Image (cartoon, grey):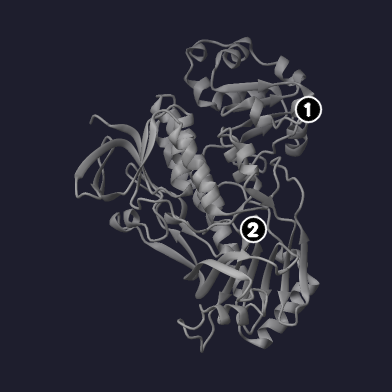
Amino acid sequence: MSTDVDVIVIGGGPVGTTALALLGRAGHTAIGLEKDREMWPTARAVHFDGETMRTLQGLAVADRFIGVTIPMKHVDIVNEADEVLVHAPTDRLGDQAWNDHISFHQPDIEGLVREIVETSPGVELRCGVTATRVESTDTGVEVTTLDEDGTERTLRARWAIAADGARSEVRRALGIETDKYGEDAQWLVVDGQLVDAPGYETDMIQFARYSRPALWLRLPGSRVRMEFMLVPGDDPDEIVTPAAVERISRGILPADKFTPDRQAMYTFRGRIARQWRKGNVFLAGDAAHQAPPLFGQGLCAGIRDVENLAWKMDLVARGIADDSLLDTYESERKPHATFWVETAANQAVGIQTLDPRVAEGRDAFMRAHPEASAVPTSPPLGPGFHEGDERAGRLSIQPILADGTRLDDMVGHHFLVVADRSIYSELPAGIKAALVEDGDTVTLLDPLKIDQILDATKAKAVVVRPDHYILGAGDTAADLERLVRQIPSIAHAATLTVDTH
């Protein structure tokens, strides 16, 4: 089947547009389809972690993202009596060389990613175009589209990525069910400008109030967000009035000082799609997983999805790797995303209780074990393209070099081999030659650049994938040779078809 492009991306939100940007960076052709003519004008996601910023750093516009984000300085959990049960300072650089908690106004971020797409050769975002049918074929996909003027077209590609949100029409059309985590609850989210009123000093607060659970977030500029769980007796029409918002916020959002630009009811829910790949169609972002927002991992998880997919699609499209590499997308990402959905759903159970006795027991537990409510360490990937031991499949750190350079800015979007010189020197000549000649791999031996990675991994040799996850780590030259031979471009190279010793 002849194809129009390599990939069709369905959904033009931040996950879909990031997928387009990543594919464009790799030199591939892709078309994004977004049914809305204009970009969504109000915020939905408001939080990035350091890993997400590292992905955006790879798009070479980090300075512009810094200009529209703010680091989150601290997070609290507060009970009915306004007692701070947990206080976590978060204003520090993490091991990804970025702050681990960053707040933003989504239209600002989404607009910047769209600008990247607009200036990337080979990729485009078509707005006002609806995907009405997605069919996987033996050799690719066919997508039928409908323009606003009623024009119907058929697009062909090797793959499709469905990043069309929690109500994904593609997921439903493919007959993919979702599994439920935790209990659903209805919440009201209110975003807007708070002017000449102090708000809360803490940047993020989870209010574990049995009278009405709530959330507070301070965003860039004068923007703030509050979310309120609906409780028995609420009138859906009255609860969104300025007077009601002032009342349920306990005066923090005064009607004369807070101007909302978004008020919406939504369901606090946890869902995981049972299948993330069907033929040549892949689910990503909210189409694949939805989590309660307590740890701010929803959009982060979607960005991880497309970062994982993009480099694998690149290798397969270039004939360097077999299509089976793409099967590792679901096996790696699904357990990782499930961890965050399950953890957030479990946290929500405690935060959302309306029973004073249950809340009392929860408060006592949190006082005694504040660490149990802290943001957990990101887990390793599920089984896939990595060695699967205690060091592999985990996110590698990003050192900041002595001159202030973040390592990725020097390495680019490649496999990275870091090794102690003594280990590297024992490699067979053919392996060394393959590393030198391979355009998909960067080898670093300078202790000033790599010692932090080796120390963090407790290894003398580490191979890192293009998505910054560790392929494997070792302590001997034999370990390093084994790892290098797993790099697809090295394994594919003709130099390894002969005796390399």
Report helix, strand or loop for mark 1: loop
Marks 1/2: CA–CA distance:
31 Å
Q: Earlier in the sequence, mark 1 or mark 2?
A: 2
Residue 123, given in percent of the width and then of the height, sits at: 39, 33
Residue 301, can we see it?
no
Mark 1 = which residue?
403
Q: Is residue 478 above or below residue 245?
A: above
Q: Is residue 291 left or right of residue 278?
A: right
Residue 191, given in percent of the width and then of the height, sits at: 56, 65
Residue 478, given in percent of the width and then of the height, sits at: 66, 23
Q: Is residue 108 left or right of residue 199?
A: left
Pick whichever, 150 or 317, lies toward us: 150
Query: Residue at image x 27%, y 34%?
Result: 139
Query: Residue at image x 47%, y 57%?
Result: 289
Mark linked to residue 324: none
Mark 2 = which residue?
219
